[in-house]
Image: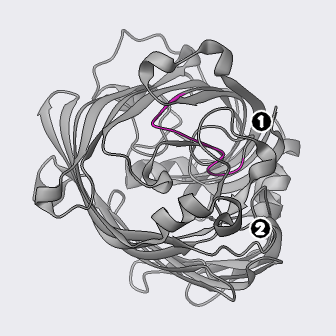
Amino acid sequence: MTRRPLALLLALLLAAPAAAQTPLKKRRPARPTPKAKEEIVKPEPRTKEDVLKTVDRPVPKEGLLAKVLKAITFDTAYGPLIPFPVVDSSKDLGPSFGFMPVIAVRNRRTREIRSVLVPSVNYNRNLRTTLTYRQYIFPDDKRFFILRASRSERVERELMTYYYTPQFLGSGVRFSVEAKHWVTGKPSFYGFGIRSRLRDKANYSLHTTGEEVIAEVPLAGSLFVNFDHSYSSKFIGPGPVEDGQLRDLFPAVYRGAAEERVFHTNRFSLVYDDTDHPSLPKIGTYASASVLYSNRRLGSDYEYRTYSFQMKNYYNYKEEGRYVTAVHYLLQFQRGQDVPFYAMPQLGESTGLRMAGDGRFTDRGKFVFTIEERITLSKTPFYKFISETEIAPFLDVGTVFPKVSAFRARDLKYGPGISARLVIRPQFVATVDFAYGSEGGNAIIRVGYPF
């Protein structure tokens, strides 16, 4: 799913001043328990009250970010409105441009911001005009809803609703549910294997209708069991890029994938998670081992299993919060019946290798390693939120293979780059990534950290 956030603002981040607050005092506590880790990352507020306390403190020097936001913000009876131009570039679909106002809606009684509306209109020569409506609803500081609807003149469609809570029915169970109808024309197919050729790029559209329910149950301390259920129908059709259609370049692959298929999958994971935040972590470790299975007796059209082993580590330099080294490892492979290419592990722009287009490499297994140095440049209060600017030099490394024994270090692809980010705590980050490697350069605009 392509998300096109605050491009003009993010373009200014690289020039942001190095500090909008006085330096943090160094602390050297003993190695914390998972609960205590929340208290280490001091300037990170842990609750709504902490957020309000932090922003009520005087800021020694107003940073560039605060000046830009104030200059383009309009106060309305319902809340602040920020109009943003949108600029995007994709290896798969080319450049896009448009307009996206961000509207924060206050509770009339408490004057607190409980909802953010993000409609947009943009133009791309392949998709033509796209209208999108997004709404983010925050009942409190932990739960949230996402509603999204989008329609392009050519190919792309979306209707989606999503809900997440870390305390389902007052328990410690993390729970999320999503329902969607989604047609995307962004990914491409290049053939199978790590030696597929860039010049064989073939465009298509992927149609998905279904639901997903995830529950994560605490076992002991930072150990959880995760259950992920998904039921959906999928098939492919012609894509928006007229030059280089999958049905013309890979007719046999297209015929097999164009038939509508049912995927009923269940995944069980053992998870260790002592990170300090579910979406904006600064310290801790997340590790998981999982098996996803699809069984004909349960209504799926395919019998296969997907095994995944993943680790994310966030090292907070001197526990000050300004320098965070983030590392991600992923090993994934499939066994069983062959499935359509779109259901196989893929390596590309949104799947671990930012220098390449989406779907660049496809096979039965993949390996990904990424390291980032996330450096906070400035911290500014803005409408009772904590806004941070951040840069992050990174290195992506990855490959695909038909089976684990066929993994070869010489097949690894490397993609160094740098990210500019706007972090609005407690739970939003907008990112511009610039990556380069053997596949050339790539610029990506997204919402959320890559891991």
Q: Secondary structure at mark 1?
A: strand
Of discs 1 and 2, which sits in the foreground? 1
Q: Position of residue 306 (x, y in %)?
A: 32, 39
For numbered disc 2, what is the local secondary structure? helix
The reply to whether residue 68 is visible in this rendering is yes
List x then y, in percent, for residue 440.
85, 40
In which quadrant of the rendered view does residue 218 lie?
top left
Q: State the quadrant of the N terminus.
A: bottom right
Query: Where is residue 310 shown, x and y percent of the image?
Result: 40, 28
Question: In the rendered view, does 73 fall on the left or right side of 113?
Answer: right
Q: Residue at x 65, y 22 (%)?
A: 412
Residue 182 located left or right of residue 189: left
What residue did someone put label 2 on?
70
Classify 10 Å Cα crowding around label 1: few (below 14), some (14-19), many (20 and above): some
**284 and 62: which one is in front?**
284
Residue at x-position 69% and y-position 32%: 195
Query: In the image, 94: left or right of 47?
Result: right
Q: Is residue 4 above or below residue 126?
A: above
**Relative to the observer, which residue lies in front, 118 or 55?**
118
Residue 418 numbered tag = 1
- What x and y, as percent, mark residue 32? 33, 17
Q: Amino acid at mark 2?
A: Lys
**Which of the labelled discs sits on residue 448, or is there none?**
none
Residue visible at 51% across and 39% down? 363
Position of 427 relative to 98 (above/below): above
Tag 1: residue type? Ile
Region rendered in magenta: 357-367
Q: Gap in Å between the C-alphas at discs 1 and 2?
A: 27 Å
